[in-house]
Image (cartoon, grey):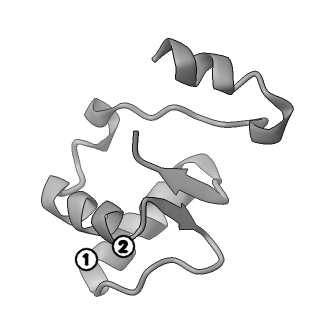
């Protein structure tokens, strides 16, 4: 976690947010696993098309932090 918090200080990732698992408790872990197996980094402009449930999860991840990219660490 220290690395991620230090990374947030870098200009290239300005505005980065670290989201913990507890804050994603309303999402289905199996669907999140499926999403990140297909794409380790999600880009808002071209998210993977994995079906309605996954699409909803992906949209939530981007909207939650007004993100352009989402990755699981």
Above or below for 11 versus 5: below
Rendering quarter of residue 46: bottom right
Residue 60 image position (x, y, % from top left) = 44, 61
Residue at the spot x=28%, y=87% of the render? Answer: 51
Tag on residue 8?
A: none
Frontmost residue, 27 versus 6: 6
Q: Circle 2 — which element?
A: helix
Residue at the spot x=14%, y=60% of the render? Answer: 30
Q: Is residue 16 left or right of residue 36?
A: right
Frontmost residue, 24 versus 13: 13
Q: Circle 1 — which element?
A: helix
Distance, label 1 to label 2, CA atoms, is 5 Å
Residue at the spot x=23%, y=67% of the render? Answer: 34
- Tell me the quadrant of the picture where the C terminus can be found: top left
**Residue labelled with disc 2:** 56
Residue at the spot x=81%, y=40% of the render? Answer: 12
Residue 37 image position (x, y, % from top left) = 29, 65
Q: Is residue 65 left or right of residue 1?
A: right
Q: Residues within 10 Å of mark 2 (few under 14, many from 20)?
A: few
Residue 32 image position (x, y, % from top left) = 26, 59
Above or below for 18 versus 5: below
């Amino acid at each position: 976690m220290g690395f991620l918090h230090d990374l947030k200080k870098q200009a290239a990732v300005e505005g980065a947010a670290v989201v913990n698992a507890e804050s994603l408790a309303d999402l289905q872990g199996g669907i999140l696993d499926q999403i990140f197996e297909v794409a380790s980094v999600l880009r808002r402009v071209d998210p993977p098309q994995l079906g309605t449930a996954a699409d909803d999860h992906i949209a939530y991840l981007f909207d939650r932090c007004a993100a352009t990219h989402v990755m699981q660490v």
